[in-house]
Amino acid sequence: MADESEWIKLPLDDRCIHKVWKARLHGYTEAIKYFGTLDSKSSEFSKFLGIIKKFVVDTNAVAQEKGLDAVLAFLHNAASAHKTSAEVSSGVVLKCLNSSRTKTKEKGIEILMVCIELEKQEVVVEEVMKGLTNKQPKIVAACVLVLRTAIGNFGSKIISLKPIVKSLPKLFEHSDKNVREEAKQLAVEIYRWIGAVFKPSLQNIKPVQMKELEEEFEKIPNKAPKQIRFLKSQQAEKEKFEEAAGDDGESEEEEEARPEVDPFELLPAVDVLSKLPKDFFESIEAKKWQTRKEVLDNLLPLATSPKIEPGDFAELVRVLKKVLSKDTNVMIVTVAAKCLCGLAIGLRKKFNPFAVACVGAILEKFKEKKVMVVAALRDAIDAIFLTTTLQSIIEDVLAALDSKNPSVRSETATFLARAIRHCTQATLPKSVLKPLSVALVKKIGDTSPEVRDAVALSLGTAMKVVGEKHLMPFISDLDKIKQDKIKECCENVELATGGGKKKKEKPAAKEPTKPAAAAAPAKSAGPSKAKPAKAKTRPASASSAGKATKSKKKTKASEESEKKMEPAYSPEDVDEKAADALPASMLQQLAHANWKERLAGMEELTTKIHNMEKKDIDCQLYVRLTAKKPGYKDANFQVLKAKFALIGILAEKGKFSRTSAGVCIGGIVEKIGDIKQSATAKETMTSMAEACGLQFVALEAISYAFDSQKNPKNQSETINWFTQAIQEFGFTAIKVKNFISYIKKALVATNPAIRTSAISTVGVMYMYMGAPLRMLFEDEKPALLAQIDAEFQKVTGTSPPAPFRGVKKEEKTDDVDGDDGEDDGDEDVGDVGGGAAPSIQDLVPRVDISDQITSALIEELGDSKWKVRGQGLERVQTILNGNKFITSNLGELPTALKPRLSDTNKILSTNTANICTQLAHAIGPAVKVHVRTLVPGLLMLNCDSKASVRAASITALSAWEEQVGLAPFIEDEMLNTVLAKESPFLRMEVFGWLEEKLAKYHTLPSDLALSVPILYAALEDRNPDVRKKAQGVLPLFMMHISYEKCVKMTNKLKPSSKTQVMQILEKQRPNIPAKPEKPGKAKKTKAAEEKKRPKTAPAKTESSSTDTSPVETTTAPTTTTKKKSASKPKATKSSKKQEEEDVGPPVILNNLKDKRFRDEDNLKVLKWNFNVPRDEIIDQLREQMQPCVNSSLFTSLFHADFKHHITAIATLKEAVSSCKEASIGALDIILKWVTLRFFDTNTTVNIKALEFLQVLFNMLAEEDYSMHDYEAYAFLPYLILKIGENKENIRKMVRNCIKTITKIYPASKIFQFIIDGLKSKNARQRTECLDELGTLIDLYGINVCQPSPPKALKDIAVQISDRDNSVRSAALNTLVQAYAIVGEGIYKMVGRLNEKDVSLLEERIKRSSKKVKSAAPPKTAPSQESKLTKQDVKKSSLHHGRRRSSNRAPSNGSDRPSTAPSQTSSNIRNSNVPQVFKLDLDGLGLNDGDSNDNIPQLEDMDHVQDLLTDAVKLPERRLQKPNLTVAQLDFIISQIASNDIAISLQSLKQLDEALQDSDRCKVLTDHVDQLVVTTSLQLRMAFSKYMSDENTSKDVIRMYRCLVALLMSLFQNRMLATKASKDVLCDLVNGLITVLIDNRLESFEEGPQVIRSINMLMVKVLDQSDPTNSMCALLKLLQEYVAQESSSQKFVQLIMKCLWRMVRSMPEIIHDINIERLLLSLHVFLKAFPSAVWKERTNDTPLRTIKTILHSLAKILGAKVLNNLVLINDKNSEVELYLKKIVKNNRKSVGGDHINGSVQETRSHSSSSSKLASPRRASARTNDILAEIFKRIGSKENTREGLAELFDFKCKYPDVDIEPFLKKTSPFFQSYIERGLKNIATEREKAQSEKQRSKENNVTSVDSISSSEGGTPANQDVSTSQLRDRLKVLRARCGLDNGSEAVQESAPVKQGKPELVSSSSIESDTPITLGSSSSTSSTQAQVPNTNVDDLRKRLERIKKGGSMN
């Protein structure tokens, strides 16, 4: 009991699998009770799904028996029981059927039967069939018993007999007697169900066994068996069976026919091809006939196999056909014919591809006279015909009928008679019957009696098939004897389809047969109606009503057909009736030779018919009278016109039948192309179409135009009439399928008029059928397809007109006719625009590819090698590519594809998904039969981690959903089962896919609720993407299931989960969309509207007119009109008030906008966020808009008719100019209303809305309006959706709108909306968005990329791998625009890309030849800046500047938006549009003013002798260097960066020459950046590549010299130098300094000279280029190298020296500097390296340099410097704090208004300058300098330079003690330094003496100036240029003018701040030295020779003048 107490407490499922059998027994018992109490869809059943098999295979016999009871209970009660069928069936077969316990065995069989009831019969049969191969005979016998029981219970329709029949022969050969006995009983049961067709399958068993079976077969009663157990889906049949069983004997009267089974399907297939001898094809062509005969004899038994395995029989059939046609031996021909006969019988429809070729050969071979041969040929052609159709072989048959050989004609006609016996009226259409009848009628008078008899038999058989009425028009001209003979054959013939000799009473009395015929169906329907009456009342009434309706329709159809067809009159009948109806004089006139008489007769006849009553008019008589000679070929056009008019009158007034129409249609078509008769002919045909139906008249006319006559004018005009008729009668009036072949024929006609007419027809059809129509023409040539597409584009968006013609109604006196008329009328106006278009799936011809799905292909798909499987998939794709439209018969392909979806090779699984996509498109809606097989695998494919695999799966699922809908996915718990798998990728993809699809459906199966628990689990998933997708699809689940049910289902969740899920439900509840309308609801509404229109009204067309009449307004079905109609008196009373309101402004000014924004903030209103506008969203907008517009505008805004929307847009457009403030106040709701119009499909509304937006945004820009974020968020996403529109004009208007919006909304925020547009699945939208992003980057710079440039560029770079080519190209172009700004940094920003994407990007950048550019912000005048506050600056920057033109390319920099940063001229490009060729007169020098174009003057005769003696002077030839074109310049500049040094040098030389020429160098203005970039690139190549290569290192010096020379020429030109941008200068300075510090240069002889040249170039670059760009570039370089710990200190020092030089010249260039940009660069540096960071560094010189720059700016500008902090958005900026500190200190000092310090300050500085700096104050700086100097001395390469610098240091700072540094070195090193210093001192003295001697040459002057005057030490050299500079400074201080060259310059920066760089290092008297040789070589610029004494005197005078002031 202790053990029992342990397991008794366990859960039920644990007890059922306990190791103790008693526990299991107890669990099974409890489970039986428990299962009966649960709901069928309870989740408790899912606990047992995995363990139910263990119940069946229990090892304990007692427990097993109880377990089987539990399994039965589970199968009966659980909705998910079918999922266990496979494993349960397998367990039963293995463990129950061999049990010794009878009950166990019986229960096992019962379980299998229940599984079959659950519709898993295939699974059960498959598992049982496996048991047939078991080694235990007991199991085999039991399995046979199961099969017999299943067939007996369910029948042969449910249980597939084919695999069972195949296994029977082996069972009959089994060694066990019981197995053989069971097999016999199984065979008897099968025979009971399918009868004698089963016998051919038993031909291989032993004769004894066959004899026993025959005896058993005879005992079976001849009564059809009945199904006694039913599937789950057959509950209705089950109820009928139970009721029938309850009605004692009544059921015996209703015996059902035995189910038809084709014995062919049960036969085993023989593989003929594999059994052919290897030398078959060689032997068949042997010369000896015996060899050929032997080969064919061997083939004959194989070919005559009852069933043949399909394969490639093309070669075999070709050989047999050749033998049949050309072999002379009749015996061989006979055998070949028998072989073809056998192949046709064995292959059946799969012989179809070879049938046509064989029929032609056999018909030709009928000339043989041997009876044996002819008999074989007859058998062969009869068998072959069954594999094809008469339509396919008609050409060969017609040719054989015209053969000269009577035997061929006779046998062909006889074959036709036999073939037509197998036809029906559907398979013998008029297109086949007509040519055959015409050809046979010609041969009925043949000279050979055999031919005449055979022809009569053929025509008689055709009459039997199609009826006498259809054949009589073709044989009406035959004499009575021949007609009687044909009718006799018709009566005697028996059709293969079951027709017999039954219609003998028909000729006796025609009238009485009509009611009998009508009563016959009623009688036959009597017994069938009695049976359902006993069932439930509701179904019985429904079925009876349906049958009554059906019979009514049949009656109407028969009467309608009789009304439209009538017996044809013979010529004798016409003469007889005409004589009775018309006077003889009129008849004579009608047949008179004179046209005037005929015309008079026609007029008299027309008048007579006008006066006749309808019942008295015999239409056929008068039509045949008009057709009498000359008929419709009358030479006089007036007579012919009168005849056509008469036919039209007859069609309108009389009972005009199709027989009458058939008489005259051909004649009318013959004249429809005649310009005189065309209009009348078309009107007549329209009248006939109204009488007989458009389908009949149009098909007759078009078929006659293309088949019976060849006049192209008639063909084109017939098609034109047909096109117009479609629009007048509606699309439902025709069956498109019948016309497609003629339209295709017209499209490829040689006559252009026919093609044009056909294209117009296709365009009209497109209005009704839409895009699917194009599928019918995809096989046409590309040029024709382009024309068709262009026609489609014209009519896209145009609604088809409503039909106003139709088959005319009969008068109401005739009830039947009246009903018909009503029905017809309903059909005519049932749908707007002529009714629903036929499904394209019904129009396309489909191919059965099952014969191509061979067993070899199936084996390949299941092969163990992945390459073989891949080849199999490729073969399947090839088959599908060759057959665009196929049937759903795929053979075993779906079963073979199913495991490939889960293939371990991801490429194969992706390919399989793509094949599934193809299958859905190719099969259409019929693909539904394969949903259960393939869709689960497609869903499970989303578990894969690869995005490409999941994308292929989603594409396939979408394709299947388009064809079959979403219901099959949800039924059978397919979706629920898949989602139960805990895969984040699966749930993420499937939920995302459902989010797109669920919104389309009005109703879905209730099984959708089973997925809700999984959805709730996904809401709490750890994966954020899963949670996001689950939240996205949740509102759609609530839409279909209801919010209340979803809340109720949370009760099963845990408390914590329930709370969280409930919060999400509440949050998503407002987002529940409205259910879409039912598919038929909208159509009915439109139909009701159209019904009101009179039938005679013209076609209703859409117009873009904004004028709407009051009638149209009142008839529109809107809610407002309904309310008005309900209260008419009130409406009349308030009409005057309403008119007064309408007089006011359309948009009302109020202050509700702020309230709406507050409501948005407080979430009081619904967010304007939707995929499709919902009703609650529209209602909310209606409430918000009502107080903002007047009533008339409000009505138009929310009207159902699009014309009112156009009116509203026009009103709003006027209000934009007349009510600007009101329009701005209502801007948010106006924009929201426009977004609703974006969802309209009417193109006119969309265009008008976009035009209005353009006007609106232009007004807002003029008013300097700034768009609010709420307005942008509600509008911009939907505007961007329209940028992916199909129509180019709409896309262009959207682009223009976006350009205009940049004037009123920040481009950076617009950028975020556009980049969100990249998530769209519309490739065109992604392309356009990328183009717009590229435009924004080009116009606004890289900072427009939000949230950050790297993040944005990564999103853009992802698009490079897009499948669409245009998207890839647009993404690359956008990245190229970014590259033009950031340069190589683009690769870092885009993140990691695969190699392919990187190569594409590099290639596009290379091809684009884009240069790296830098756009500087616009400079503002100082006076303007000082007046603006920060807010004003922002506002002015928003609207300042020029605006873009909407008609130009966005990349043109000449016209930029106001918010775009200003472009330098280097960014402006000349147009590259090719010009028309013309002579360049300027280039040739022929257009100059000094060109001599005077006429020569003749000399006098007196001077002739002098002229002859004078020397001849040749005219001087003026040579002019040609100007460089932009293309030439780009090419030369690009050659600078060539890898070939020679090419690069040549380009440098050419450019240097251009720079020397002042005229030619102007071309370079826009190419400076490009030139400097390529030069910098070559500098880096020379440094990194050429210097390290021994072969090219010798050319490096030459390269350096040429590069420096070119750059020197460039930067000497001030105009060109200022064009260099910051980034370009940064690269250049980087390259130059890198070369300067390259020690390898010293190894070259000319290396020092190169260094000196680069030093000079550096000075020139700093002096001549734009100072803002120079300083910002240096600061950027300094920041980059300070950030690198491994950077060279020497490099950093040289950068700082450059900055010091710029600081020294800052007073001169202060007005050329953009202070805002400079401060921003300083802020960026200090933000990256704040002051606190430098405390940890050993050297803080960079920081002190930055502070020195700030100090200088503050000293120069004073407090004004604080006004230039606009670009710095950081309130805690260190720059701002430091500047405020300096300004505050300056205010305390005296004379702070002086530039760079006061005069006293200058004097004190001058007086103390002799002291330089105290050691204590300069200790930190001097220590750094000395450390650097001693470091130089310690290196071998720079020892000499270090000693020179130490000597200069000692001269400059004599008080500084260097002993501490010397003590750290060795004595030897100390002595070395002392010797070196002495040597340098000696050299300097010599140099000083040489300078004194050269003083006379005035090259330089050296003198000493007292410290009180100049502020420089007396022992230093003073150059002329320095004296000139000081003179300028002093003149400026005194307010004197320096002339044209005067530039303000500041005094040295004041020392005294310890954190600043000392002024001595900044203001050095010698120029800044930047290289290793800088200490020994001066880089001073040469100046004109000037007397130094004069300069001194001028300096003293100026100073005295200043002291006096």
Image (cartoon, rainbow, N blue to C red):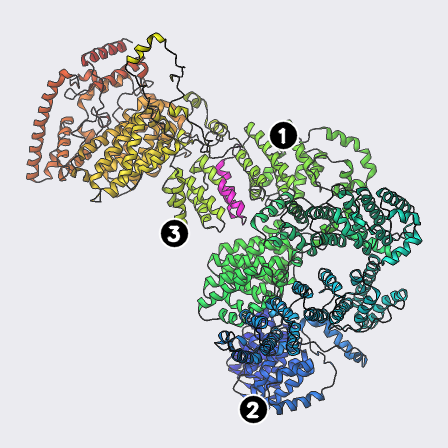
Q: Amino acid at mark 1?
A: Val
**Picture residue at 10% right of the left edge, 21% below the top:** 1890
Q: Are marks 2 and 3 in contact (CB under 8 Å)?
A: no
Q: CA distance from mark 2 to mark 3?
A: 69 Å
Q: Position of residue 550 (x, y in %)?
A: 80, 63
Q: Position of residue 1073 (x, y in %)?
A: 63, 50
Q: Label 1 belongs to which residue?
A: 1216
Marks 2 and 3, the one that precedes in the sequence: 2
Please identify the quarter of the rendering in which residue 404 is found.
bottom right
Quick check: is 1313 in the magenta stretch?
yes
User: What's the mark number on residue 1395?
Assistant: 3
Q: Which residues are magenta?
A: 1302-1331
Please identify the quarter of the rendering in which residue 967 is found.
bottom right
Q: Position of residue 197 (x, y in %)?
A: 67, 80
Q: Label 2 belongs to which residue?
A: 176
Can residue 939 be seen in this snapshot? Answer: no
Mark whose residue sits in front, 1 or 3: 3
